Amino acid sequence: MKKQILAVTLSALSVLAAGTASAETKIGAIFDLTGGLNIYGIQQNNALNLAVETINAKGGLLGAPVAVVSYDAQSEQSKYIQYANTALMSDKVDALFAGLTSSSREAIRPIVRRANIPYFYASLYEGGACDKQTFVTGSTASQQLSVLIDWAVKKYGKKIYIMAPDYNFGTISAHWVHEYAASMGAEVVGEDFLALTVTDYSPTIQKIQAAKPNFVVALPVGANQTGFLEQFAAAGLKSSIGVVSTNYGSGNQQVVVSPDAGKGLIASQGYFQVVENPANTEFVNAWTAKYGSETPIVSEAVDVWNAVHLWAAAVEKAGSAESDPVIAALESGLTFDAPNGKVKLEPGSHHLTQNIYIAEGDDKHSFKIIETFENTPPLYENDKCDLVANPTLAKHFTPEAE
C-alpha cells in the first residue's frame, strides 16, 4: 500500500489545555498526479493542500488540525475505485475530494453513497449528477453553454459545428449545444466525437471545411486533444470560423498552444486567473508564494479550493465532522467569498450558483475577460434534483434521456 499512496500528510493531534487530545479530522484526496490528466490533477492536489494549510494555520477545525491522505489515480479509472475504497474503508476519511473526468466521478459516487461520506467533485462537467453524498463545485455545461452559445451566435452567426470527446462530458455537452442552438434559431451543421487518444485531426478539419459553420464548439480534453486547436489554426480556418469552448484553458491549454492558435479563442468558465477581486488577489498571492507563478492557475484548482472551504465551514457549523450533521450543514445554503466571486451551495441540487466568465485568448498565452455573468444558477440541476425533499434520490440526469 505504501507504493500505491503517492503522499500521506498526517498532522499531529492538537492537545487541549485540559490535557486531553482533540480528535483529528481526516480527508482523502484522489487526483491524477501522473499520466495524461496530470495537467489538471497536480493543480487540484496543490489547491487542496494549500486550503488545508490555510485552515490549519488558523487553528484547524474544532480545535484540531486537518490531516490529508493523498493518492495518485495515475489517470486510470480503476485506480479511482481502488483508492476510494481504501480511503473510506482503511484510512476512514471524514470526507473525500476526488476526480476530474465524469467517468471517475460516476465510479466514485456509489462507493461514497454506501459509506455515507461527503464527496466533493471539483471540476467543470456536463451536469446532472444528483446524490445525497455528492457535492459539485465546478460549473455545469448548462451554466457555461447557456451564456456561451447565446454570445457566440450573436458574434459569429447561426451555423455551429461540435468537436468533443467521445464520452459523457462531450456527448451531453453536445446535447446542450443542440438545445441552446434551437432556442436561439441556430443549427448544428455537424459534429464529431473523438477518442482521447486521437492525434490526427485532419478528417475532422475536412468535415468542418465541408460543413462551413460560423463557429466551432471545441471541447478538447487532455494533452492529445489540444492538438486539434493547433491543427485548426494551421489549416488557416481561424480567419473565417470562430472557436469557442467551455474547457479551453481549464488544463492550461493556452500555455502549450502557439500564440497564433491561442489568439482569439473564446472560453467560458467559472474562473480565470485574470479575474479581479480581493479574494482572488489573496488566493493568487498565496498560491504563487507556495508554488511559484510559472504555471497559471486552472479553474479546477479553484473548484477544489472552494470545496475544501465549504466543507470546513460545514464542519464548523455542524460542530462535528460526522457525515450526517456535515451534510445537513452543507444543505443550509452556505456561501463563500471565493477567488471566482461569491459562490452559494444550493441546498437541493448540491451545485454552486456562481459567476460565469467569457474570456478571449491572446497571443501571450493568457486571457482577457470580455464579459461576466454574475450569480449564474445551475438551473437544470436545481430543477431536476432536490435532495432535501428527496434524500434517497441517486441519479445522473441527462437531457438526452428526456
Image (cartoon, rainbow, N blue to C red):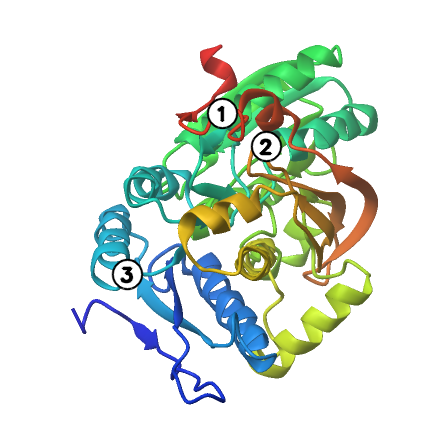
Whether residues under marks 2 and 1 lie with C-beta atoms below 8 angstroms apart, the answer is yes
Q: Secondary structure at mark 3?
A: loop
Which residue matches tag 2?
141
Observer-side mark, 3 or 2, equals 3
Whether residues under marks 3 and 2 lie with C-beta atoms below 8 angstroms apart, the answer is no
Q: Is residue 13 visible?
A: yes
Looking at the picture, does residue 92 appear above or below residue 354?
below
Give the percent coordinates (x, y) of residue 143.
Answer: 66, 33
Q: Residue at x 47, y 77 (%)?
A: 65
Amino acid type, label 2? Ala
Looking at the picture, does residue 292 appear above or below residue 87?
below
Q: Residue at x 61, y 52 (%)?
A: 249
Which residue matches tag 1?
172
Q: Which badge, 3 or 1, comes first in the chain's sequence? A: 3
How dense is the environment of label 3, judged by Cα within 10 Å: few (below 14), some, or many (20 and up)? some
Cα–Cα span, label 2 and label 1: 8 Å
From the viewer's side, name the closer residue of 279 and 225: 279
Which residue matches tag 3?
92
Amino acid type, label 3? Lys
